[in-house]
Amino acid sequence: MSTTIIAFFNNKGGVGKTSLVYHLAWMYSDLGYRVVAADLDPQANLTTAFLDEERLEEIWLEKHHQKTIFGCVEPLIKGIDDIAEPHLEYIANYDLSANKLALLAGDLLLTSFESYLSSRWHELQSRKTLSLQYLSAFWRILQKASIGNKADIILMDLSPNLGAINHAALIAADYVVIPLLLDISPLYGLRNLAQTLTRWREGWKTILANNITDAEPLPAGIIQPIGYVVCQLPMRLDRPAKAYHLLMSEIPKVYREAMLNDREDENISLQDDPNCLALLKSYQSLMSMAQEAHKPMFHLKPADGAIGAHTRAVKNVYEDFEKLARKIAERTQLKTF
Ligand SMILES: Nc1ncnc2c1ncn2[C@@H]1O[C@H](COP(=O)(O)OP(=O)(O)OP(=O)(O)O)[C@@H](O)[C@H]1O
Ligand SMILES: [Mg+2]
């Protein structure tokens, strides 16, 4: 059986996708899972979160970018070969996670793959074998990466758009988690996102059905939504401002309708919504401390500046992320540790 791949995706930018993947990758590794964090966003923010500047320079200034996701697809782009073997960056073991956390590094050059993939989506009928080789590239790279780290789980970070790279990346995903902000955007954005995911899922099903005789293994294209995570809650939920009342009752309804086609007119608040995987607070100063220290917020120590009230906050953040990681593990039927 192939390793579970979970995408964190919303075509709205700045909602907390990368921060979630970064923290969950560390958390799963703390809990004993072997993890691959895959940076398929050409902005490569996940990669800059994990690696220091020195290492970034080494891998991004290398001639063929052999240590990044771009290096994996470059032979395809050049038309000289199939995908290259992925390189995994093992994340320094300053804590307990004994090299169980690996990064498939992102690359700004990955944007150049967008137009190739876009053509392949359009040429699926006329140049089927070649197109499928391109469109399954991310999935095949992730499979190889998972074997490299004997991974239990692959977490995928994506850019905020509905383009060809994300289309090819999402058909590689078994599950998708939708990070969102408690603002008006989910009310009009979720329907469009859900329709696109359905179109991509159904489209891939048709492709697979027409391809049963071909020998090359292809992704199953399940892309099952397992819930949403509200990131950066602006306030304490026991004293919400008036404007948020509407959002807190509407978001569960809109998610149910859009993602699950469930039109039951039930009034469930965010806190009680089973589709709401977590309500994460805006951690502000802890987040900047963590970015500075190249650590997840829940690993901050007094030496990193986490003193006084921050000590308690670090513990709370650990609990928040552990709860979220375990909930996702349960919904994706991961083995438990
Ligand atoms: N819970 C949080 N508390 C405080 N700040 C946060 C939290 N989550 C994310 N942020 C901050 O919000 C900003 C956007 O987060 P992030 O980069 O994770 O979003 P994104 O969805 O990956 O963005 P993009 O769509 O550009 O890839 C970052 O500066 C991040 O540090
Ligand atoms: Mg991001």
Image: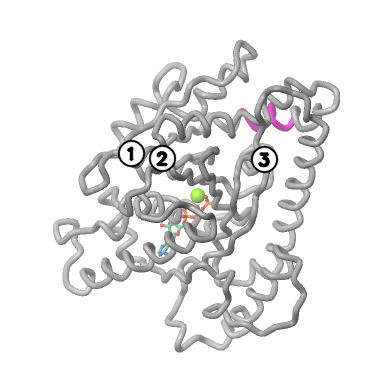
Q: Residues within 10 Å of mark 3 (few under 14, many from 20)?
A: some
Kindly report the distance in space between the C-alpha atoms of the residues bearing marks 2 and 1.
6 Å
Task: Please tell me whether mark 1 sits on a helix, a strand or a loop.
Answer: loop
Q: Say left or right for 148 vs 332.
A: left
Q: Which residue is at a point 18% across and 59% down the rendered structure image? A: 301
Q: Nearer the viewer, mark 3 or mark 1?
A: 3
- State the mark number for residue 47: 2
Q: Residues within 10 Å of mark 1 (few under 14, many from 20)?
A: some
325 or 192, nearer to the observer = 325
Identify whether 241 is placed above or below 87.
Answer: below
Q: Which residues are magenta?
A: 113-118
Task: Please tell me whether mark 3 sits on a helix, a strand or a loop.
Answer: loop
In terms of secondary structure, what is the magenta stretch mainly?
helix
Kindly report the distance in space between the C-alpha atoms of the residues bearing marks 2 and 3.
27 Å
Q: Nearer the viewer, mark 2 or mark 3?
A: 3
Q: What amino acid does circle 1 point to? A: Leu
- State the mark number for residue 51: 1
**Residue 275, image x, y percentages:** 59, 69
Identify whether 119 is placed above or below 62.
Answer: below
Q: What amino acid does circle 2 point to? A: Thr
Q: What amino acid does circle 3 point to? A: Ala
Mark 2 vs 3, N-terminal side: 2
Q: Which residue is at a point 31% across and 31% down the rendered structure image? A: 55
Q: Which residue is at a point 70% across and 72% down the rendered structure image? A: 254
Asked if the magenta segment contains residue 115, the reply would be: yes
- State the mark number for residue 220: 3
Identify whether 145 is placed above or below 232.
Answer: above
**Residue 50, image x, y percentages:** 35, 43
